[in-house]
Image (cartoon, rainbow, N blue to C red):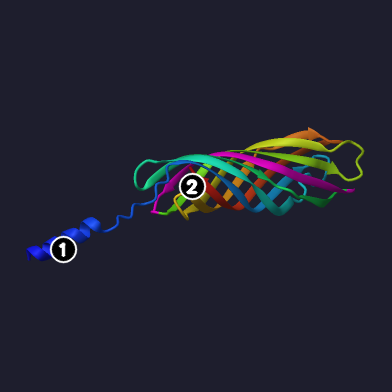
Amino acid sequence: MKRIYAIFLLLTLTSPVYAEHNWSGPYIGLIAGVNRIKTKDTIPNYDPSVIPDITSTNFAGGFKAGYNYQINPKYLLGIEGNLIFTPGSKSESLTGGSNSETYSVKQNHILNVAVKAGYISDKFLPYVKAGYSNTRLSDLNYLYWTEGAKKSNHNGLILGLGIDYAFTDKIILGIEYTHTNYEDKSFIYGGPNTLKPKNSNLLGSLSYKF
C-alpha cells in the first residue's frame, strides 16, 4: 500500500500543470473586414424632405492597440483604440418634387476608443464594449454643382461584442461586430442639408500581446 501511495505521489508531483492563459497586458494588432455606412440625408427644400438612405458596403482595414487587466481568473476589463480606413463611396440618385440629381457621400476613416468587459474561459475571451467614435465624411457633393464638395466630422456612441482566442501566449485571433450611431450635422450646400450617419463593422483581428 505504501508503495502504491509513493507511486501516486510521484506521478502527481511530476505531472505537468496547465495554467490558464493570462490575458493581462498591452497589445497591438491589425484589423480587416467589412464596413457598412448608412447616411440619412434631410433636405428641407425637397418634398419629401427625407430622401432615401445613402448606403455603402465595402472593405475596411486598420490598426488597433489596447490594454487588458484580468481582475480575477474569470473576469477582465480593458481599454482599446482603433483606426479604421474605409475606402469606397456610394452615389445615389435623388428625386424630390421637381428635383432630380445625384448626391454622393464618401467615408474616409473611423476612430474608436472603447472600454471592454470580458468573461475568461481559458484561451477564449468573449466580451462586450462601449465607447466613443468619430468618423469623417467627404465628397458630400451634388453632381454638376459648381460649389466645392463639403466635408464633415461626426461624433457617436459605439457598441459592440466579440470573441478573442489565444492562439499562443503572444498571438491573439479575434472577430468583432460593432454598431455606431453618429450625431447629425447641418450645413448649407446650395440650400440647407442635414446628414446623420450610422455605421456597422464586422472585423477580424490579429494581435500581438506583450
**Residue wearing tag 2:** 128
Q: Which residues are magenta?
A: 98-122
| Picture coordinates of residue 137, whole percent (x, y) | 74, 40
Amino acid, disc 1? Ile
**Residue wearing tag 1:** 7
Answer with mark 1 or mark 2, whichever residue precedes in sequence.
1
Q: Kindly identify the residue that appears in the image at 46 percent across and 53 percent down.
A: 168
Label of residue 52 in the image: none
| Picture coordinates of residue 166, whole percent (x, y) | 46, 53
| Picture coordinates of residue 177, whole percent (x, y) | 57, 52
How many numbered discs sit on the rendered protein? 2
Q: Kindly identify the residue that appears in the image at 38 percent across and 54 percent down.
A: 122
Displayed quadrant of residue 138:
top right
What crowding class fits label 1: few (fewer than 14 Cα within 10 Å), some (14-19), or many (20 or more)?
few
| Picture coordinates of residue 124, whole percent (x, y) | 43, 54
Classify 37 as above or below 136.
below
Q: Secondary structure at mark 2?
A: strand
Q: Kindly identify the residue that appears in the image at 44 percent across and 47 percent down.
A: 118
Tag nearer the camera, 1 or 2: 1
- 90 to the left or right of 169: right
Name the image quarter holding the N terminus. bottom left
Q: Residue furthest left?
A: 1
Q: Is residue 63 magenta?
A: no
Q: Is residue 113 magenta?
A: yes
Q: Look at the magenta stretch and give its main secondary structure.
A: strand
Q: Secondary structure at mark 1?
A: helix
Amino acid, disc 2? Val
Q: Nearer the viewer, residue 207 or 40?
A: 207
What crowding class fits label 2: few (fewer than 14 Cα within 10 Å), some (14-19), or many (20 or more)?
some
Q: Mark 1 near mark 2, Cβ–Cβ under 8 Å?
A: no
Using the numbered discs, state the Cα–Cα distance from disc 1 to disc 2 in whole angstroms: 47 Å
Classify 39 as above or below 1.
above
